[in-house]
Structure formats: structure tokens, C-alpha cells
Image: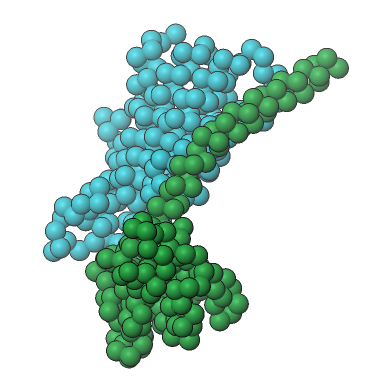
């Protein structure tokens, strides 16, 4: 058994959901055209994964094995709906920008994956910490990708122009293909850094 | 058998708890969401009829477009009541680069545009989405059917296209022109202050 601290940090580096496990790429590639979108999507996923991990872990002894996946999905979908409604009510602009991708957190395989692989066989608090670490790792990856794409693609950082008008925007980075390019380069960088 | 029953009970129970919890969240967020929607309309009205006093809940008029679809005309009461100082309504550009573009158009009684506001669109980020920039939307202010050829410059008109994106500006300017023509044809009805919802008067005078 590893300590809680390691349980938290493993999601950020050693088992980073994006750079190591390459999970949850759908929202990652779709919404990271700006840094703020990346952070918002990351935090929404963080909330869902912490809550669903906690609930799944606390119910793990009464959930029958044969129907565990439908039950995980119900739990995850409920928390996603809570996020969707709350963002609509209190963070309306962000909600409009992220659009369809908030409901789609339900099918983020990272979240279901943590329920199945971790929360279903670990105590409540440990699962919560695991969710927190994974969520932070995911948020960090989305933020990094969003930052790179926003700065190089539109010359802005958090909506403020930082590169000046002389900079020629690399438009492709804002578009969906640019997400793959940026993602591939970062994945390579992360792995070579990890190996050395 | 008992294991089947147990599955049904656990699954059903969790569904019920989830349903109840979500009903609660829905109730809590219902009002803030309605408020946000209203705020959005107010924001667009302020943008397209600058300086005029508009309230989306009063003094509107439900009318029909040429194709028979319903359109709600938001109106700003004139000084002292009894007149209409400006009208705003939604137009739809069906020919955007990806999907429809919804635009709020504000028109003054003299037929000039108070401004336009993009309500929603799905244009390419970084290209077509530049229609959201104030520097482009602003060029519509003060234009009317008399002083402007509502085509993009590439097509021989007066409206600036955007670098790398001609389709979105072309679609919007076409929709705005259609809106202005509709306003011209329905001017008397739109400017009839006695019709439709009454403005909420704060100082006591009634129209």
C-alpha cells in the first residue's frame, strides 16, 4: 500500500491520465483551443471524478458485480448533470463555450476507468484522493495543451494579446488538426523527459 | 433468484436516489438559469440599441417574418411615451459556413441600424468566429438600406469581409439586409406604440 501523498501525485506524473495512459482524449482535443476552456473542462471533470470515485467506493460492498457498469454510469451521469446545470446557472459564458462537451464527460473513459479499476476495490478516502490526483493530472494536461494552442494559435493568453500584432498566428493550432499535432509533440516531450 | 432480486433492488434504489438528487439540483438552478437567459437578451439589446432603455419583458410585439415564422420585436419606448425609439429583433442567417448564425438586429425609426450582435454561431474558431469581434460588428452601426449595399466587398458591396473568411460575413450581411427590408415593410406596425405589450412606466405616465 502506498501513502496518500503518492496516491495523489501518481495521477499528476507517474500515471498521468493523458500523457501516460492516453485516456479522455475526446474532450482534451475538442475544447483546448484556449487555456481557460482547458481549465474549465479539467475542473468539471475533476469534480465528477472525485464525486463518482467517492460514491462508488462507499457503495462497493453492496453493488452486485453483474450490474456494476450501469450503476457506475448512473452515478457518473448524475454528477455530470449537476455540473451541467450548475455551470449553466453560475458560469453561463463558459457553459456556452464548452457546449456539448460537458454532457460528454459521462463517456470520458478516464472516469469510468477509475471507478472500475480503482474505486471499486479501494476504501472511500483512498478513492477520493485517487480521483483528486487523476483530476488534477487531467486538468494540468488540458491547461498545458490549451495554453500552447492559444498562445501559438491566436497570440493570446487567457484572452489577452501577449505576442503583439507582428506575430503571425499559426491558425492550424486552433483548429481540430492542431490539437492532434500539439498533443503528439507534448506526448513525445513528456515521455522523453520521463525516460531520462 | 435472490441475487437477481438484489440486482434489481440495488440498481432501482440507486436510480431513485440519483433521480431525487437531480430533481433537487434542477429546482435550485432553475431560477439562476432563467435569469442568465434573460441577462443574455438584455446584453444583446443594450449592444444593438445603445443608449436606449429596453426591457425584454415589456413593450415587445410578437410578429411574423415573411416566411411566417414568429419573431418577437423588442422595443424601446421614446421620450415621454407614446412613441417607439428603436426596435430589435432576431434574424437568422441560414447560410453560414457551418450551420445557422443567429443575429440580433437593432433598428432606429429612421431605418438606420443601431447595431448587430451575434447571438450564436458555429463558425470556424479563429477564422469565421472573428465575426464576434467588435471591430467587425461595429461597421454595421448607422448603416441603412439607403446608404449601404449589403454585400461583401468581394461581391461588389460595402461590407468588409474578413481575412480568410468571406462566407460568414456574406451570410450575416445578407440576413441583416433581409431584416432591414422586413422592418421597412412592417415599419408602421413595429412603430405603433399602442400595439403589443405596454412599457413599464416608472414615472407614472402611461402611453
Q: Which quadrant would residue A59 be assigned to in this image?
A: top right
Q: Colour of chain A?
A: cyan
Q: How is the image coloured?
A: by chain
Horizontal relation, residue A133 to residue B161: left or right? right
Rendered view: A91 above or below B116: above
* Residue A161, quarter of picture: bottom left
Q: Is residue B104 visible?
A: no
Horizontal placement of A151 versus A21: left or right? left
Front-lying residue, A153 or A190: A153
Residue B188: percent from left, percent from top: 46, 83
Tell me if residue B78 comes above or below residue B34 in the rendering. below
- Looking at the figure, which quarter contains the C terminus of chain B? bottom left
Q: Quadrant of the N terminus of chain B?
A: top right
Which residue is at the far right? B1
Residue occupying image coordinates x 34% and y 27%: A13
Q: Visible in this render: residue A125?
A: yes
- Which residue occupies 38% across, 74% down? B83
| Residue at the image point whose x is 37% and y is 30% from the top | A137
Q: Position of residue A97 (x, y in %)?
A: 40, 51
Q: Which chain is green?
A: B
Pick the residue in front: A31 or B43.
B43
Depth check, front residue: B143 or A153: B143
Q: Place residue B50 in its image quadrant.
A: bottom left
- Across and down, in percent, residue A169 comes to 24, 61
In depth, the one of B197 and A172 nearer the eye is B197
Instruction: State the image coordinates of residue B169 (x, y, percent, origin top left).
Output: 36, 75
Amino acid at each position: 500500500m502506498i501513502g496518500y501523498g503518492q496516491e495523489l501525485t501518481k495521477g499528476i506524473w507517474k500515471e498521468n491520465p493523458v500523457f501516460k495512459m492516453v485516456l479522455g482524449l475526446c474532450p482534451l482535443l475538442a475544447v483546448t483551443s484556449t487555456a481557460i476552456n482547458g481549465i474549465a473542462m479539467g475542473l468539471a471533470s475533476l469534480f465528477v471524478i472525485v464525486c463518482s470515485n467517492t460514491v462508488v467506493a462507499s457503495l462497493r460492498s453492496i453493488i452486485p458485480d453483474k450490474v456494476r457498469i450501469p450503476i457506475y454510469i448512473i452515478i457518473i451521469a448524475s454528477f455530470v448533470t449537476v455540473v451541467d446545470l450548475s455551470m449553466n446557472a453560475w458560469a453561463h459564458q463558459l457553459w456556452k463555450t464548452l457546449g456539448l462537451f460537458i454532457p460528454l464527460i459521462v463517456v470520458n473513459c478516464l472516469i469510468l476507468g477509475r471507478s472500475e479499476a480503482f474505486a471499486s476495490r479501494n476504501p472511500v478516502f483512498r478513492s477520493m484522493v485517487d480521483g483528486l490526483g487523476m483530476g488534477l493530472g487531467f486538468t494540468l494536461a488540458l491547461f498545458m495543451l490549451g495554453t500552447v494552442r492559444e498562445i501559438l494559435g491566436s497570440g493570446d493568453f487567457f484572452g489577452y494579446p501577449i505576442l503583439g500584432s507582428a506575430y503571425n498566428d499559426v491558425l492550424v493550432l486552433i483548429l481540430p488538426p492542431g490539437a492532434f499535432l500539439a498533443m503528439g509533440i507534448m506526448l513525445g516531450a513528456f515521455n522523453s523527459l520521463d525516460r531520462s | 433468484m435472490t441475487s437477481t432480486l438484489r440486482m434489481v433492488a440495488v440498481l432501482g434504489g440507486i436510480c431513485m436516489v440519483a433521480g431525487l438528487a437531480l430533481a433537487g439540483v434542477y429546482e435550485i438552478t432553475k431560477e439562476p438559469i432563467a435569469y442568465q437567459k434573460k441577462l443574455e437578451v438584455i446584453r444583446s439589446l443594450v449592444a444593438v440599441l445603445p443608449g436606449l432603455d429596453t426591457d425584454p419583458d415589456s413593450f415587445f410585439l410578437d410578429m411574423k417574418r415573411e416566411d411566417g415564422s414568429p419573431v418577437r420585436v423588442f422595443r424601446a419606448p421614446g421620450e415621454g411615451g407614446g412613441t417607439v425609439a428603436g426596435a430589435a429583433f432576431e434574424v437568422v442567417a441560414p447560410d453560414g459556413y457551418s450551420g445557422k448564425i443567429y443575429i440580433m438586429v437593432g433598428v432606429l425609426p429612421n431605418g438606420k441600424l443601431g447595431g448587430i450582435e451575434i447571438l450564436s454561431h458555429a463558425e470556424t474558431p479563429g477564422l469565421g468566429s472573428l465575426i464576434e469581434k467588435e471591430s467587425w460588428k461595429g461597421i454595421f452601426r448607422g448603416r441603412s438600406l439607403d446608404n449601404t449595399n449589403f454585400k461583401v466587398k468581394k461581391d461588389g458591396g460595402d461590407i468588409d469581409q474578413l481575412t480568410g473568411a468571406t462566407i460568414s460575413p456574406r451570410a450575416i450581411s445578407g440576413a441583416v439586409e433581409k431584416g432591414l427590408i422586413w422592418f421597412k415593410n412592417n415599419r408602421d406596425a413595429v412603430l405603433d406604440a399602442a400595439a403589443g405589450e405596454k412599457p413599464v412606466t416608472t414615472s407614472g405616465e402611461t402611453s
